[in-house]
Image (spheres, rainbow, N blue to C red):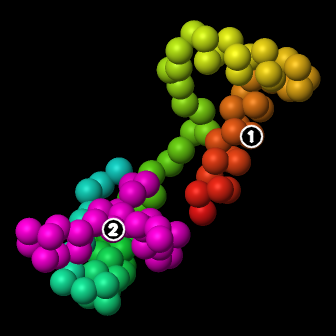
Amino acid sequence: MKNILTYKDYIGTVNFSEEDALFYGKVLGITDSISFEGDSVESLTEDFHDAVDEYIEFCEEVGKEPQKQYKGSFNVRISPELHRQASLRAQADNISLNSFVEHCVREQLRQSL
């Protein structure tokens, strides 16, 4: 079971509040904050779709890029020993450390989807 919803290339989290008897979530991968909720899976999904559609419409009205832009680079902080091990493995595989990390991330994402 995955705790995400997808619609028009947008991803929303799925959570449940037992106290409120309510499903809720937020849209990931955007610079703005969009949340949605519902008292059933159907109503949660409908509210998610409506929230995405309204967000896209709003962005079009104000001339804003709706999705967060990613540069393709980010800093990762790991322990010196893990850094050493990854570097040695990359060298042994005759690839760059960057290629090694990209492969590991890609493989982890493949397994989780």
Question: Camera-side residue: 95 or 16?
Answer: 16
Amino acid type for the residue under numbered disc 1: His
Direction from residue 36 to residue 73 in the image, left or right: right
- x, y percent for residue 42: 31, 89
The reply to whether residue 18 is in sight is yes
- x, y percent for residue 22: 17, 76
Which residue is denoted by mark 1 in the rendering?
A: 103
Q: How crowded is mark 1: few (under 14 residues within 10 Å), some or many (20 or more)?
A: few
Residue at 88% across, 20% down: 92
Is residue 2 covered in magenta? yes
Q: What stretch is highlighted in magenta?
A: 1-30
Q: In this picture, is 68 found above or below 90?
A: below
Q: Do the residues labelled 1 and 2 touch (CB within 8 Å)?
A: no
Question: Camera-side residue: 106 or 17?
Answer: 17
Q: What element carries label 1?
A: helix
Direction from residue 100 to residue 67 in the image, left or right: left
Which label belongs to residue 14? Answer: 2
